Image (cartoon, grey):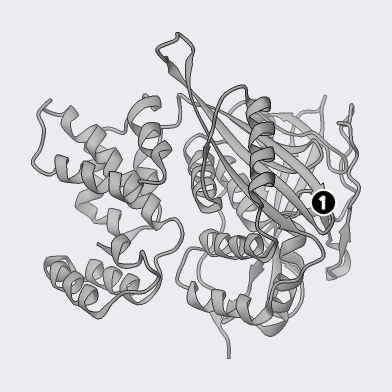
Amino acid sequence: MLVVAWADGAVAEGERERITERAAELPERLRAWIQQRLHSPPGPYFRYQVAHLLTFLCSVWPCETGESHGWQADAEIWADEIISEASWLRRLFGGVSAERRELNDLRKILADGEILATDRIWALARGSHAALAPRHTAVLREEPGQCLQALSITLTGNKLSEDGAPERIAVAALSVAPRDLDLEVNRVTELLTRYGHLRENERWIVLAEEVARAGRPLTPRQRQELSMELVERLGHPFEEVSFAELAYLEDALAVDAHWVSWLPGKLEELHIDRDRVSRKQVPGTFQAPRGEVLAQVDPKLVPGPPGLGFRVLDIQCRSVQQPGRLRLASPVFLQEPPTAEAVDWVARHLPDMCDPCTQLVLDEAAGTWMAEVHSHCPEQESADPEPLPDGRSLLVPPWVWFRAAGALNVRFFAGKRKAAG
């Protein structure tokens, strides 16, 4: 009901009353959760989380008795309606995915009420991605003032399709990354205020969508050319999804399958999976077996402009034969509401972090902050690991940082910041 109520961007009074009435028999803290989402937008991931939950329940619940339950037919209809534009989600959890959570675990979560109390509903299906082999493919085309990009993920299951080939699901988001274009400060302030109740990673995804909207929209010809080139590279068709849909899938893969792949531009890739951690480009080339990697978050933030700090993920290879180190930094607001200086920094530099052909570098020395823009990445991969200089970190978009930490099982504080004043 919440998904439908927010479909047009606002909740009508009649919808609010109807949902409040239906929620009257829920426990108090769940009623409070419902009321919060009636007054604040639930975020770009919400409908996928709900659809994921319904799809998962439809798949796993009959496993106990082999019989259909009364709610299942309705749930399947709801899931289909919610994800009518994202059929990949239903096929992912109903076809390709081979593993399911134990029903007892599901019952415990239901009993604790955590399904409604958490924004991490996809964690219900932890393990569903375990049989999949993700592959990240990108097509980049530079144009004056912007970069066109098609980012895709291909998931290969352990089942065979009708033609005897492994079953694959490929999804891709086509977008424009603007060049030398700052976001409107008032718009950034508005979005940060409106979505202040969301988890930190999803709040940044809202800002990333704003960056994409700031550029010139793709023309039909550009979209067709990007799609054709991507199909040629993949060797099979793909389903187009939104940036939020792709981000949701990448977040789920990072948490559930310990996989993340980041391609900032020109053959440059950060890849984390069960077996290895690698980055195929200078500066900061890093290659190490997964089991020999020690990853942790620095206990202190690197200071930035007033009200903004930088959280650093330190990845080290403990192998004597192949030592290496990679540091990833990402901005974090130190208080709510964010300071004017913090908002100005985001409006100016977030588009640079979204540009697949630039790389920002954080200088941690002496507690000062600066950014270097590497606009001309090497065209070829580096043959030998070449670490970043001491005191330097790659400044990556926050959603990439969260996925890297999730794929490496790194725990850190990401709670609410102190209120201003």
Secondary structure state at the residue bearing disc 1: strand
> In this image, 315 relative to 234: left or right?
right
Residue at the limit of the structure toward the top, as seen here: 164
Task: Return the residue nearer the eye: 254 or 366.
Answer: 254
Q: Visible in this render: residue 205?
A: yes
> In this image, 258 relative to 306: left or right?
left
What residue is shown at x 63% (from left), y 34% (from top)? Answer: 136
Q: Is residue 186 above or below residue 382?
A: below
Residue at the limit of the structure toward the front, as seen here: 221
**Mark 1 = which residue?**
143
Task: Return the residue nearer the eye: 218 or 254.
Answer: 218
What residue is shown at x 59% (from left), y 61% (from top)? Answer: 209
User: Residue 122 sits in which quadrant?
Assistant: top left
> Whole-percent x and y of residue 222?
69, 46
> Whole-percent x and y of residue 266?
82, 39
- Which part of the image, by quadrant, shows the N terminus? bottom left
User: Residue 269 sits in which quadrant?
Assistant: top right
What residue is shown at x 29% (from left), y 67% (from top)? Answer: 5
Residue at the limit of the structure toward the bottom, as seen here: 421
> Whole-percent x and y of residue 343?
68, 77
> In this image, 233 relative to 414: left or right?
right
> Whole-percent x and y of residue 340?
69, 84
